[in-house]
């Protein structure tokens, strides 16, 4: 057999090796998406757009949408600020830095269900360790109801999200910082620039592409949040922590209205796409 | 003053990160009297394994554990097999449009495809089975595997497998014997990512597998949360069991964590 004879048995060329993946995704990602369009047009009176027109007047949906945006914005601000702070702290070389980094990443890897269990136990108003500790220090805890009252529930679920996902921001921003060239920073220091000036004029602009990616990925996940809130509060008390995904879930699997639920899920998809495109545009505009 | 600030802030961050996890672990090892003690007991308590014994004596808990392992494990193997082939193809014969299309399927919020997938699985009579979860997780992890492995293959010069092919290997043989051994760390990291995603997944598992026989660990634990609010021992022990494997996977992911989490958009 010469090296150039055709192999036996004949195998499809490597260009075609992508086909099984395409088949799986077509069947399990693209077809469901098209199917969902059909489902979203299902109404009691045949197919039509009434599910979409109903959305605009559904006060519950609009409140859930507004609360999703509050949740997303709140968690983003906390996670970005703390994540950037941590990244700057760990940017400098010191002994044990790698260990610190690994330990700080733990929350993000945990199953969201376990994170929810942890915080339900810790923040239980009567028996939880946080209020217990505060009480033994003489701090009154009557108003610290956490997930238990409409006033504090949203803030509490945001804080839990921040606990789990600040590490994500920190990790990406730290990687971004470490990928920056050293020379501009040295030059700035030689020219006598202050730390604050360097941070505002150099670090932030140069870090912008990484910031955009980190914020984009986090935003997409925040808009679709389900697990933690479902276990922490089920959207309650009342409607205080209901997000779009929870409302879709309730519509589909408690009220069994698949058509309306599918219509809402497309609004969520559209919102996600619009926001993602905005971030990608920001990403492409490289700083001068 | 400034030199003291950094260690102080770092210690604070570390405590906030680790104390909740530590607290869950101690709750799972405490007798009930100690769980609710005021002031809280942080270190000095009589440890007991009773809660772990209780949950493992419950037959369903062992089933959840097995289901989670099978669903995450088998879907990871399938996604790796199908995805690695596609990734190699895309790395050696670049088709950027196709690559982006594959990645974009991962951007859909899962809630959009939950309803149609559920209807499809019902039609195929696969609801409440582990097979349903394997199918869904394979499709879910596939774009991720393609994207990751493509970047690892792109780092390997094509000359290597061309040399092997001149020596009489088929391309598949060259991929198997020459290229795959070189990307082994990347393959391991990708596998670990898929395992964690499958292991942690809740929404689909919750909706697709509702019977005790098909339930996964996160769904089983979530069920306990609402059922026995006061059984803190069982809840915390279950939580510890669910998070332990993640620590094992994490060590395999360490080096490529940034690449995986940013889908390659950030070099780390």
Image (cartoon, coloured by chain):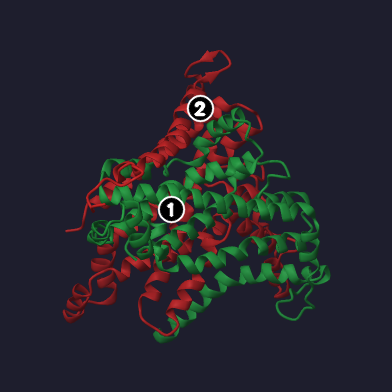
Chain colours: A red, B green
**Which of A50/B255 is in front?**
B255
Residue located at (27% from left, 41% from top)? B97
Q: Which residue is mark 2?
A: A55
Mark 1 residue crowding within 10 angstroms, few (<14) / some (14–19) / many (20+): many
Q: Is residue B203 visible?
A: yes
**Which one is nearer the viewer's eye here, B240 or B85?**
B85
Instruction: Respond whether the residues carrying marks 1 and 2 are from the same subunit.
Output: yes
Which of the two marks, 1 or 2, is nearer to us in this view? 1
Is label 1 in contact with label 2 (beta carbons under 8 Å)? Answer: no
Which residue in the structure is indicated by mark 1? A218
Please tell me which residue lies in front, B9 or A169: A169
Reading the chain from its start, which is encountered first: label 1 or label 2?
A: 2
The residue shown at (48%, 67%) is: B252
Q: Which mark is residue B16?
A: none
Asked whether, in this view, residue A91 is left or right of residue B13, the answer is left
**Residue A275: x %, y % from top left:** 37, 43
Residue A165, position as x, y percentages in the image: 49, 59
Chain letter belonging to callout 2: A
Which percent across, then down, holds residue A260? Answer: 55, 26
Q: Is residue A59 visible?
A: no
Report crowding for label 2: few under 14, some 14 to 19, many 20 or more residues within 10 A (C-alpha).
some
Viewer-nearest residue: A125 or B92: B92
Could you tell me residue A256's position as x and y percent?
64, 28
Kind of element beneath mark 1: helix
Label 1 chain ID: A
Occupied quadrant, residue A26:
top left
**Quick one: quadrant of the C terminus of chain A?**
bottom left
Which residue is drawn at the image coordinates 40% and 62% (left, top)? B186
Report how far apart the C-alphas of labels 1 and 2 lie in the structure: 26 Å
Q: Is residue A33 left or right of residue B52?
A: left
């Amino acid at each position: 057999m010469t090296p150039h004879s055709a192999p036996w048995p004949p195998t499809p060329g490597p260009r075609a090796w992508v086909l099984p993946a395409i088949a799986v995704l077509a069947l399990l990602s693209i077809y469901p998406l098209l199917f969902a369009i059909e489902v979203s047009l299902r109404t009691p009176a045949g197919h039509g757009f009434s599910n979409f027109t109903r959305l605009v007047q559904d006060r519950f949906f609009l409140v859930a949408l507004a609360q999703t945006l509050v949740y997303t914005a709140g968690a983003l601000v906390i996670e970005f600020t703390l994540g950037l702070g941590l990244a700057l702290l760990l940017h400098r070389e010191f002994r044990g830095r790698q260990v610190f980094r690994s330990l700080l990443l733990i929350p993000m890897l945990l199953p969201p269900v376990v994170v929810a269990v942890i915080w339900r136990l810790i923040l239980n108003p009567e028996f939880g360790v946080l209020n217990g500790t505060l009480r033994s220090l003489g701090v009154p805890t009557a108003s610290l109801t956490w997930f238990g009252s409409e006033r504090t529930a949203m803030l509490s679920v945001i804080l839990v999200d921040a606990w789990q996902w600040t590490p994500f921001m920190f990790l990406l921003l730290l990687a971004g910082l470490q990928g920056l060239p050293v020379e501009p920073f040295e030059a700035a220091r030689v020219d006598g620039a202050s730390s604050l000036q360097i941070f505002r004029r150099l670090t932030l602009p140069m870090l912008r592409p990484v910031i955009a990616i980190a914020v984009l990925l986090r935003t997409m996940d925040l808009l679709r949040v389900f697990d933690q809130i479902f276990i922490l509060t089920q959207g309650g008390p009342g409607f205080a922590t209901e997000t779009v995904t929870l409302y879709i879930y309730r519509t589909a699997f408690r009220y069994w209205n698949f058509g309306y639920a599918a219509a809402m899920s497309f609004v969520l998809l559209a919102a996600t796409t619009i926001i993602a495109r905005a971030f990608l545009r920001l990403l492409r505009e490289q700083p001068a | 003053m400034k030199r003291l600030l950094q260690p102080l802030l770092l210690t604070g961050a570390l405590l906030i990160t680790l104390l909740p996890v530590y607290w869950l672990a101690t709750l799972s090892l405490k007798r009930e009297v100690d769980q609710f003690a005021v002031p809280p007991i942080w270190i000095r308590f009589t440890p007991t394994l009773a809660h772990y014994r209780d949950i493992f004596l419950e037959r369903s808990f062992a089933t959840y554990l097995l289901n989670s392992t099978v669903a995450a494990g088998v879907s990871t193997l399938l996604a790796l097999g199908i995805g690695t082939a596609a990734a190699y193809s895309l790395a050696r014969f670049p088709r950027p449009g196709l690559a982006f299309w594959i990645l974009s399927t991962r951007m859909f919020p899962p809630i959009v495809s939950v309803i149609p997938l559920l209807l499809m699985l019902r039609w195929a009579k696969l609801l409440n089975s582990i097979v349903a979860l394997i199918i869904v997780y394979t499709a879910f992890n596939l774009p991720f595997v393609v994207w990751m492995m493509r970047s690892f293959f792109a780092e390997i010069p094509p000359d290597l497998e061309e040399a092997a092919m001149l020596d009489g290997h088929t391309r598949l043989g060259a991929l198997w014997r020459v290229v795959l051994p070189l990307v082994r760390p990347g393959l391991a990291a990708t596998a670990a990512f898929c395992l964690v995603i499958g292991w942690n997944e809740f929404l689909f598992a919750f909706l697709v597998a509702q019977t005790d026989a098909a339930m996964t660990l996160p769904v089983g634990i979530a069920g306990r949360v609402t059922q026995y609010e006061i059984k803190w021992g069982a809840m915390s022990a279950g939580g510890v069991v669910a998070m332990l494997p993640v620590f094992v996977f994490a060590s395999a992911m360490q080096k490529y964590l940034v690449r995986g989490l940013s889908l390659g958009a950030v070099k780390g």
